[in-house]
Amino acid sequence: MKTKSPRLPVYIDLPERTLLEDGTFFVRLRTLNDLEEFWSTYKDKFAFACEGKSSEKPRFLNEYEWVFGPTKAAVVCTVLRWGKSGIGCEFYDWAKHDPLMHELFFLDRNADRDFMIKKGVWSEKDEMDFHNDCARRSSETYRGWWRFCNVPNGYSANEWLNGGQCHEELIDPNMDPMEAATTLQEQIFDDWRQSDFWELESHTGESINEIISYWKNERAKGEGYYGDENEPPKSIS
């Protein structure tokens, strides 16, 4: 059974309405008016954001909590409480830690090619892609990849961070660790934006404008909208 951990980012407090060292800004926006007023004031200062969504067991942000920032990586760093939560970045040496699966990867890749050729469905493009992949990922050059590490509660990085988009793996063990971390953080921001991750959503300035417009239209139609439950009760005349 997975239990709560004090290392979950959501349990590490962020100072509200304070510009942090990396240029990010944490704020609670509990109503549509709060969101619209804040964005009208600060939209020229922040290019990216992450929004906490409704969740029974949030791991990153609570509902109506936002992190704004100048870059994707900066926003993700704050959401993950980088440097405080214990979450980090490492090169996973696949060939060292799982040599059998490492070897089988290349055997299976060759076997798949042979099988498709025998079936007569192997194209010139397939052959070109195969050789390009072999040139990039040989048994000597493809020894492992950079990944997030020290994720809480025993989750794998992919499970906990809900990755899965088709990003190119970072396979150079000599890559600068800070560069690798920044790239992974940017990839996670894009994953959160493109996937159906229900706990939070990442935004560009354009998408924030779009959701404000959407919720204002819903409110005008008498439908439920962002933060409607937090509005003061309307007086009955």
Image: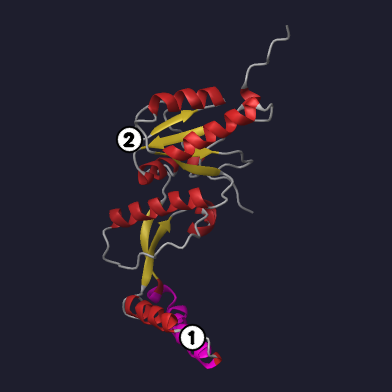
- Give the percent coordinates (x, y) of residue 50: 47, 40
The residue closer to the viewer here, 214 or 85, is 214
Q: To which residue does mark 1 refer?
A: 122
Q: To which residue does mark 2 refer?
A: 23
Query: What amino acid is found at the position of numbered circle 1 in the picture?
Result: Trp
- Give the percent coordinates (x, y) of residue 168: 39, 64
Q: Furthest residue to the right?
A: 236
Q: How many numbered discs?
A: 2
Query: What amino acid is found at the position of numbered circle 2 in the picture?
Result: Gly
Residue shown at 41% from the left, 48% from the top: 86
Q: Quadrant of residue 232?
A: top right
Which range is magenta?
95-118
State how far apart marks 1 and 2 are (Cα): 50 Å
Dot 2 falls on a residue whose secondary structure is loop
- Is residue 159 positioned above or below 81 on the image? below
Q: Main secondary structure of the magenta part?
A: helix
Q: Is residue 1 left or right of residue 134?
A: right
What color scheme is it?
secondary structure
First reached walking from the N terminus: tag 1 or tag 2: 2
The residue closer to the viewer here, 148 or 121, is 121
